[in-house]
Image: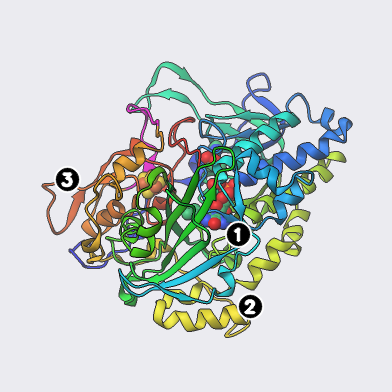
């Protein structure tokens, strides 16, 4: 199983976890011990908060139904210190759904609120064949962004939280939802996690047990890899006849720059990735201008996204971003500036065929939980907001008449801009599994014909089934200078990561594993969580060290053979500008 460079798939070493057994609770606490709410929304990101925002708009005009939902009509359960704390995106957003959600706000007002940074009027797409050359090409259709808005989803979530609170929502921050409550084949709400446990799970002096939060409707808005979403998919068989979900990982930095960037930039490689299909590397970069109208600062969002389908264990999105910054195209934008933020996050890349069934008795899914991202265009924010609007409409219509059948939401998504846009790109990413050179022309044909040619249903294989080998991608990574290029730990530091040193380990992985799997996790993890002991043998199994308190909860480990579970509420990064 474990010879060096023997190409080992991480899925051969599955995490010690039983999602349905551990994460579904089948008996409710007594009525006086639990909290009853009208609608429980798990996840205070863009999608969950859009659901809350819309619901409260509807309930605001209907005091009778509001009253019927009890003292807490809408509760949002968010594990970060504040909404926005764990949210990260590029982010250039299609504006329609946000305009629909807050119909009386202008885009100028978005910018005054500090979550939007200007309309895209100029853009450029480059091929980067080498570390020195950038060839400008006409923007392929998925890269056309004219009229879109550059935003920060972290700042947007804070704004949405404030709106939701003004509308009467109860926002439970620093609270992880750790179990799905299921009785009689129906989701009844969620259980929140305990707080104040020590390294070995023992209760400390400040121990507070979790609580059952029961609800008439539960919304799973957990983002890219949902802890309860995964349990729900298994419990209700929501992935039947769908393709497996696959993921990408993005690392982002925000820079204060000396002179404003006047255009949106994408590069499509192949540099700094390898062209040979043996490496399985597909990815790209973005550079977006962010003019902060509140502070007057000229900021730039820059990031590198890599498909987690790669085979070279030494692929590291963080180090590839550092390498990319050395390209003259980037240097002339960033040099003389200062890095002000860093973060990392995975996103679901399977698209239309990988979307699970979105509804189950008592609950539904919105945004990335439901896999609603077009990864060719790298766009999901507008789908998150639209799905929140549609979910709120479906829930409100049922609760108003005392019902709990939310299945109309499924068709509403299919018929909306979400279903239409994702269907058009249903086959567009999969051909890249054949490599950039072979897959590229098929991708172009799929884009030109909106998935009709060569047509069919293109499948995915799971990212953790990819056999990994120890390659040489790492040989190109720059040595961080601490000013322009950075290591992982100093990057985690600026996220404000606040995980207690004596918190229990929330990362489930096998620790006695072949070197190929260990190296995969060491290089992949943007936060430097995994370490191979210096005296570990070159061949055979190694004893992995897991520095879990560094984790920024990007979710990538779940795609590549391990399992992220929610740590104690309040732990993890505190993003503000990502
Ligand atoms: C690197 C990168 C670049 C991107 N670029 C773009 C772009 O330019 N344009 C675009 O439109 N889209 C882009 N996307 C996609 C877009 O960012 C996502 O589709 C969108 O932000 C997802 O929003 P969400 O609310 O569904 O999930 P999230 O933003 O992930 O929010 C989920 C929230 O739920 C919380 N949570 C999760 N589980 C629990 C739990 N069990 N208990 C309590 N809280 C929980 C999390 O802390 C988080 O706050 C990008 C994504 C990435 C990763
Ligand atoms: S340990 Fe945390 S930061 Fe590292 S890959 Fe896993 S989820 Fe991401």
Figure quadrant of residue 473: bottom left
Disc 2/disc 3 C-alpha distance (Å): 49 Å
- Is residue 505 within the magenta segment? yes
Instruction: Determine contact: label 2, label 3, CB under 8 Å.
Output: no
Residue name at image x 55 percent, y 32 percent:
82
Residue name at image x 48 percent, y 40 percent:
22
Question: Judging from the image, what secondary structure is the residue with disc 2 in?
Answer: loop
Where does the magenta region start and end? 498-509
Question: Judging from the image, what secondary structure is the residue with disc 1 in?
Answer: loop
Q: Mark 3 points at which residue?
A: 533
561 vs 577: above or below: below
Question: Judging from the image, what secondary structure is the residue with disc 3 in?
Answer: loop
Residue 72 appearing in the image: yes
Figure quadrant of residue 173: top right
Apparent side of residue 113 relative to residue 134 in the rendered image (left or right): right
Residue name at image x 59 percent, y 73 percent:
141
Q: In the image, which disc is placed on residue 450?
A: 2
Disc 1/disc 3 C-alpha distance (Å): 48 Å
Q: Mark 1 points at which residue?
A: 120
């Amino acid at each position: 199983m474990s010879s060096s460079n023997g190409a080992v798939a991480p899925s051969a070493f599955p995490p010690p976890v039983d999602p349905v057994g551990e994460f579904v609770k089948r008996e409710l606490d007594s009525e006086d011990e639990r909290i009853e709410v009208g609608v429980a929304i798990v996840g205070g990101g863009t999608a969950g908060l859009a659901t809350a925002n819309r619901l409260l708009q509807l309930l605001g005009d209907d005091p009778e139904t509001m009253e019927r939902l009890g003292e807490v009509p809408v509760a949002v359960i968010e594990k970060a210190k504040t909404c926005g704390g764990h949210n990260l995106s590029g982010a250039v957003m299609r504006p329609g759904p946000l305009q629909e959600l807050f119909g009386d706000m202008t885009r100028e007002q978005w910018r005054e609120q500090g979550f939007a940074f200007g309309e895209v009027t100029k853009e450029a797409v480059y091929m980067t064949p080498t570390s020195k050359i950038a060839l400008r090409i006409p923007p392929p259709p998925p890269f056309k962004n004219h009229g879109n808005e550059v935003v920060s989803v972290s700042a947007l979530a804070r704004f949405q939280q404030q709106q939701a609170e003004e509308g009467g929502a109860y926002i439970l921050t620093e609270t992880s939802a750790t179990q799905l409550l299921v009785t009689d084949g129906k989701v009844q709400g969620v259980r929140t996690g305990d707080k104040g446990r020590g390294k070995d799970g023992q209760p400390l002096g400040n121990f507070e047990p979790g609580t059952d939060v029961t609800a008439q409707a539960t919304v799973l808005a957990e983002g890219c890899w949902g802890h309860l979403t995964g349990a729900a998919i298994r419990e209700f068989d929501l992935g039947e006849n769908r393709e497996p979900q696959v993921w990408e990982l993005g690392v982002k930095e925000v820079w204060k720059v000396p002179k404003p960037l006047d255009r949106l930039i994408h590069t499509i490689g192949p540099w700094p990735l390898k062209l040979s299909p043996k490496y399985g590397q597909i990815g790209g970069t973005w550079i977006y201008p962010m003019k902060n109208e509140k502070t007057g600062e000229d900021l730039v969002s820059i990031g590198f996204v890599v498909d987690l389908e790669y085979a070279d264990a030494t692929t590291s999105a963080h180090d590839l971003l550092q390498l990319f910054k050395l390209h003259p195209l980037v240097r002339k934008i960033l040099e003389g500036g200062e890095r002000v933020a860093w973060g990392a996050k995975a996103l679901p890349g399977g698209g239309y065929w990988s979307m699970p069934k979105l509804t189950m008795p008592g609950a539904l899914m919105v945004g990335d939980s439901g896999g609603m991202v077009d990864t060719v265009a790298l766009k999901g924010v507008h789908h998150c907001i639209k799905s929140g609007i549609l979910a709120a409409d479906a829930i409100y219509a049922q609760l108003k008449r005392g019902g709990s059948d939310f299945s109309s939401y499924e068709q509403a998504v299919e018929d909306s801009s979400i279903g239409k846009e994702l269907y058009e790109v249903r086959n567009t990413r999969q051909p890249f599994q054949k490599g950039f050179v072979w897959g590229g022309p098929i991708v172009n044909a799929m884009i030109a014909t909106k998935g009709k040619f060569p047509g069919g249903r293109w499948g995915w294989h799971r990212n953790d089934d990819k056999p990994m080998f120890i390659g040489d991608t790492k040989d190109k990574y720059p040595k961080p200078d601490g000013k322009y290029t950075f290591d992982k730990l100093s990057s985690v530091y600026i996220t404000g990561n606040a995980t207690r040193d004596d918190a229990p380990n929330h990362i489930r992985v096998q620790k006695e594993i072949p070197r190929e799997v260990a190296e995969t996790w060491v290089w992949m993890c943007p936060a430097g969580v995994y370490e191979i002991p210096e005296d570990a043998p070159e061949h055979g199994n190694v004893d992995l060290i897991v520095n879990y308190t560094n984790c920024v909860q990007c979710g990538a480990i779940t795609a590549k053979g391990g399992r992220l579970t929610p740590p104690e509420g309040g732990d993890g990064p505190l993003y503000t500008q990502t």
